[in-house]
Image (spheres, grey):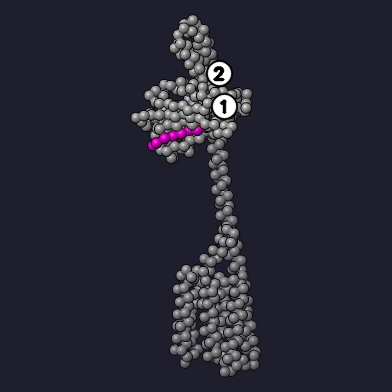
Amino acid sequence: MRPDGASRHYEAIQDVRLEFSKIGCITSASLILLGFGLDWATYPDRLTEFFLVRLGVAGLSLVILAVLFSRYGRGNTRFLTLAWLVLPQVMIAWMIQQTEGVSSVYFVGLQLALYGVGMIVPISYLESIGFGLFTVVVYVLACYVHPAGLGDGAELLAHVIFILFAAIISTGCTYFNEVSRVRLFQLREQVVHQNADLQQVNQTLAEVKGQLVQREKMAALGTLSAGLLHELNNPVNYSLMAINMGLTAPAASKDELLKESLNDAREGMERVQSIVSDLKTFAYQKPGADVLRPFLLEKAVHSARRLAGFELKGMAVSVTMPQDSHVVGEEPAIIGVMINLLSNAAHALSNAGRERPEIMVSAVIDGDRMVIRVRDNGQGIAPEHIDHVFEPFFTTREVGSGLGLGLSVSYGIVQRHGGTLAVASEFGAWTEFSFDLARPHP
């Protein structure tokens, strides 16, 4: 088995050989027929005989040409090329034997064939050497069987030397042509590899550019979050103080509904504090190991369900948890992730208009991790959008309905916890988001 590069080189050389062999075969057949004029000028008494021979050899050349156009021709280009190259040499040698032997002017035709091979036909230099030696042999043999024989040998030697000169020149041209083809292929391969490398560099630059843009967005988001946190801290603190004072009032201890409402309000205000903090943490990607503590995932899910209760009105929400739902993480941040996933599911169900809108929250233990899934039977996510759902500022909602930051922030929070937020969907049927959290060590 050839390496890929060598295989491509071999195929390229085969293509070149085949095309040039076809062109060379047509050229050879044409020159064989055009040689009729030389017969008319030099040996008019043999005109008819030579013409019929030329016609037969040209016909055989065209038969070989037809084979070259077949599937067999592609696999046997070398053999077929040498075949149509040999035909005119044999014909010329026969004509030399039939005319003046050593003194025949047709020996020039043998030389012209050698020059043509060197300039046109893409055979190897070893094949060119063999073709040159073959030409010398058939010429000497034609002269030998001529009635006049080899004569004194001087003229034969001169003609053989001329034929050898032509053979040497042909071999040299063939060798340099072969080297040129190899180097041309190497240059072409180098250009292909360089283009591939350049494409890879461009792709890398595009990714780096995207990352830089992302960092700029996140830096701006971090600055905004820090400002919001500073501006919101005081009113949130005042509200929390007021809620705590309300919880200590006698009326709160007597009225369970009032007490539960005040607790929910306090939880909501605490969540306001954590939202901006989550945005800032996501923007700068600075995890805090000291805030990762064991907590009950079931409790966090129920808190998120209560806080997203307004959006979940009229929708069936089922929660399936293992008996021990302890996980390790930042509870407010995970509550935020769950609120976002529940809100997105509610939005998808509202758009889908299902008769029985349903959201299923489940968790399963997988080794030392807890895998949480939030699945809805909404409208699903379009295939062209599913690869972009975690990108910051990407949203399919109408203008004013969201900035497209919820999933990207949630992705960062889960990533900060050592997990992965993933999505699966069947367009028009359902969507499921899943993420994993570490469980406490025994």
Question: In the rendered image, which quarter is residue 237 located in?
Answer: top right
Query: Image point 60% across, 83% down: which residue?
Result: 136
Which residue is most to the front? 323
N-term mark: 1 or 2: 2
Alpha carbons under labels 1 and 2: distance apart? 31 Å
Q: In this rendering, does residue 408 appear at all? A: no
In-front residue for pair 412/172:
412
What range is drawn magenta here? Answer: 428-435
Q: Nearer the viewer, residue 162 or 401?
A: 401
Magenta-span inclusion, residue 300 = no
- Residue marked by disc 1: 327
Res. 230 mark:
2
Residue at the spot 39% in from the left edge and 34% down from the top edge: 379
Q: Residue at x 54, y 79 (%)?
A: 86
Which percent across, then down, holds residue 339?
Answer: 48, 25
Seen as rendered, the residue at the extreme top is: 250
